[in-house]
Amino acid sequence: MDILNILVVLLLSLSLCVCAVVLTWLYGRYKALEAAHFSLVQSMDQLNSELAGLCATHLRVDASLISQEKQIQAFLVQPPQAAMPSREQLVHTSYEHAIERVRMGAKPSELVTEFGMSASEAELLVRLHTGKS
């Protein structure tokens, strides 16, 4: 019995040592998982913060796009004449300015340079409007 008791005690001691080693290993794994969990929680908090910033930026961009769309719609509703003068109006205005310049003593070469007209047009304007008040 004495040997049997010793074997039982040895077996129990060995079992306790194995349990201690396993518990130590499990505790190490627990601490590693706890650190990984903490890191993941911090990452999630940072991502949530970035997501909130992106949502706020998205709202500002949406508001800007809506404003620009309203401006475009208002522009499209305007009559075309109000938005841009016609070619005829521009030509008429440029001839009026050229005639004024002739009355102030401009030469045909100056009219060609300033208004981009041909030399014959400039000479005709000078002949027609020289001396008129």
Image: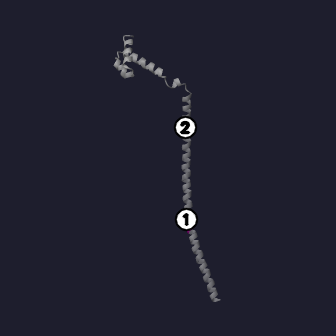
- Read off the magenta span: 28-34
Q: Nearer the viewer, residue 50 or 90?
A: 90
Display colour scheme: one colour
Q: Nearer the viewer, residue 18 or 74?
A: 74
111 shown above or below 59: above
* Image location (x, y in percent) of residue 104: 36, 15
> Residue 103's image quarter?
top left
60 shown above or below 94: below
Q: Mark 1 highlights which residue? A: 32
> Residue 16's image quarter?
bottom right
Say whether marks 2 and 1 touch (CB < 8 Å): no
| Residue at position x 36%, y 19% in the image | 119
Q: Nearer the viewer, residue 99 or 124?
A: 124
66 shown above or below 17: above
| Residue at position x 54%, y 53% in the image | 46
- Quadrant including the N terminus: bottom right
* Image location (x, y in percent) of residue 114: 37, 22
| Residue at position x 51%, y 26% in the image | 83
Task: Determine which of the numbered discs, if any, sits on residue 65 in the image.
Answer: 2
- Quadrant including the C terminus: top left
User: Which SS class for mark 1?
Assistant: helix
Q: Amino acid at mark 2?
A: Leu
Q: Is residue 116 magenta?
A: no
User: Which SS class for mark 2?
Assistant: helix
Q: Amino acid at mark 1?
A: Ala
The disc, 2 or 1, on the residue closer to the chain's N-terminal end is 1
Q: Main secondary structure of the magenta part?
A: helix
Foreground: disc 2 or disc 1: 2
* Image location (x, y in percent) of residue 14: 59, 80
Classed neighbour count for the residue bearing mark 1: other residues with Cα under 10 Å, few (<14), some (14–19), many (≥20): few
> Residue 31's image quarter?
bottom right
